[in-house]
């Protein structure tokens, strides 16, 4: 079975450019998470969706970041305009939310390594 | 805001040694998870603990959830180089939103 798929795996861009990161969750999963990981700040939740609806976007740094989930099998995270401080590894994860009180297992993709020059 | 602290931040040991890493918070969690992340990859779930005082074993790894559900520990017996990685704990409070700790970076030398 395919896991979470992210593209691109690596992205190098110049400050001011638009960056779009893509994620395909595991088929059948109904929750999708976007994280950012840096050495300084660790793994930070940016936004998560449940049944394609954004539930909590309080972790989105600022208006330059936006995320969409047009259907159950695809999500994008866009940064416009990008800045050097956005350089990080961005992870997408998905899970099957069965409505219980126990957090479900999150399956992480391999990440997109973003470098903004 | 619920915060998780992990200690130690870094740990380097010889193959065959035992070790314990800790995950602490001032908040109560309904469940807590431990993940291991290897270089260049995403985190992979090791275990979920739910009940205060719960102990779970996964081969040479032993996980314990504190009685008050505010802390957890991970003990590795006879560490192997394959155990090398970043160990992350993540707390959940009756929802789908997890808070991750900063991690313990473990290096097991052959």
Image (cartoon, helix red, strand yellow):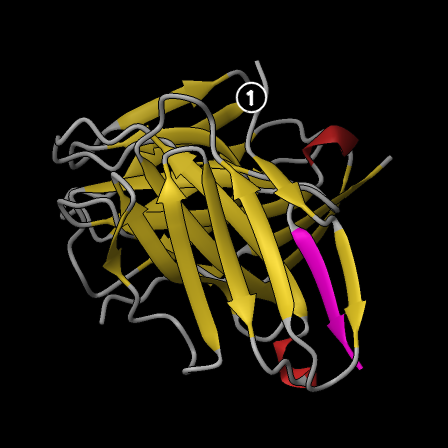
Q: Residue furthest front?
A: A70
Residue A116 falls within the magenta-colored stretch: yes
Residue furthest right as drawn: B110
Residue situated in front as seen by the camera: A83 or B30? A83
Principal secondary structure, stretch drawn in magenta: strand
Residue A73 screen position, x and y as percent: 44, 33
In the drawing, does residue B75 fall left or right of residue A29? right
Q: Is residue B109 left or right of residue B18?
A: right
User: Looking at the rendering, which quadrant does residue A51 occupy?
Assistant: top left
Task: Choose between A15 and B96: the one closer to the eye.
Answer: A15
The x, y position of residue A101, in whole percent, is 12, 35
- The residue sitting at 38% across, 48% down in the picture is A69
The N terminus of chain B, quarter of image? bottom left
| Left or right side of B60 for A103 | left
Q: Where, quadrant-wise, is the C terminus of chain B in this rendering?
A: top right
Depth check, front residue: B104 or B8: B104
Specify few, some or many for label 1: CA neighbours under 10 Å numbering under 14, 14-19, or 20 or more: few
Relative to A78, say whether A61 is above or below: below
Q: Estimate the x, y position of residue A70 in percent, counting from the top left.
A: 38, 46
Q: Look at the image and give the residue range highlighted in magenta.
A: A112-117
Relative to A114, residue B80 above or below: above
Name the subunit of mark 1: B
Q: Which residue is mark 1?
A: B60
| Mark 1 element type | loop
């Amino acid at each position: 079975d395919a896991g979470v798929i992210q593209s691109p795996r690596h992205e190098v861009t110049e400050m001011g450019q638009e960056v779009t990161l893509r994620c395909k969750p595991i088929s059948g999963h109904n929750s999708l998470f976007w994280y950012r990981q840096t050495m300084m700040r660790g793994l930070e939740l940016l936004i998560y969706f449940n049944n394609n609806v954004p539930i909590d976007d309080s972790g989105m740094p600022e208006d330059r970041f936006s995320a969409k989930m047009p259907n159950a099998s695809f999500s994008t995270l866009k940064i416009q305009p990008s800045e050097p401080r956005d350089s990080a590894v961005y992870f997408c994860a998905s899970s099957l939310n069965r409505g219980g009180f126990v957090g479900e297992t999150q399956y992480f993709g391999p990440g997109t390594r973003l470098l903004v020059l | 805001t619920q915060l998780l602290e992990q200690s130690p931040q870094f740990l380097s040991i010889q193959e065959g040694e035992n070790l314990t890493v800790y995950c602490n918070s001032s908040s109560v969690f309904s469940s807590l998870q431990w993940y291991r992340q290897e270089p260049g990859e995403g985190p992979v779930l090791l275990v979920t603990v739910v009940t205060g005082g719960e102990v779970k074993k996964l081969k040479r790894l032993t996980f314990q959830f504190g009685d008050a559900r505010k802390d957890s520990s991970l003990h590795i017996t006879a560490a192997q180089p394959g155990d090398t990685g970043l160990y992350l704990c993540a707390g959940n409070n009756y929802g789908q939103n997890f808070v991750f700790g900063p991690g313990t970076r473990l290096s097991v030398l052959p």
